[in-house]
Amino acid sequence: MNAKEILETEIPNRLKAKPEIAKDVNAVVHFNVTGDNGGTWTLDCTKPENWVTSGANGTPKMTISVTADDFSKIVSKQMNAQMAAMQGKLKFKPMDMGLAMKLAKLLA
């Protein structure tokens, strides 16, 4: 599964199945995914639906930067997100540990 499929299909499906995660996150987050099949997406958990849009829309509370390959590995549990962050493969700007932990529930 590539980054586009994860962000445009998998994450909305997870939020439909568990809408309480969107309520818990309650923030706008930009995903800046580099490499093949990369791009920029906005996750807006302040809305009741249509959470993911292509492009950088709105003012984010946090921007996540990661390569497409590493993002796929994190979501498929082939790579530990905390280790990826410590190794600089997964970057959060600004770093908001509380929000990052809430997003981990969505990506896990």
Image (cartoon, helix red, strand yellow):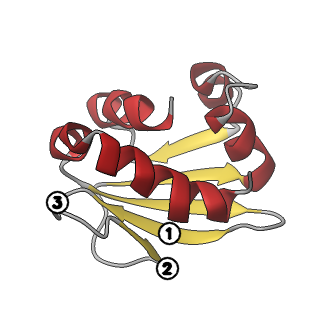
Task: Compare residues 64 and 50 and report the one nearer the observer.
Answer: 50
Q: How many marks?
A: 3
Residue drawn at (18%, 49%) of the image: 26
Mark 2–mark 1 Cα distance, whole angstroms, equals 5 Å
Is 41 on the left or on the right of 100, as rendered? Answer: right
Q: Is residue 86 above or below residue 55?
A: above
Mark 3–mark 1 Cα distance, whole angstroms, equals 15 Å
Please, what secondary structure does the residue beneath circle 3 have?
loop
Mark 3 vs mark 1: which is more N-terminal? 1
Is 108 on the left or on the right of 66, as rendered? Answer: left
Residue drawn at (41%, 56%) of the image: 12
User: Which residue is under mark 2?
Assistant: 55
Q: Is residue 44 above or below residue 57?
A: above
* x and y percentages locating residue 46 in the rendered image: 17, 59
Q: Is disc 1 surrounded by few (<14), some (14 to 19) or many (20+) residues within 10 Å?
A: many
User: Which residue is under mark 3?
Assistant: 46
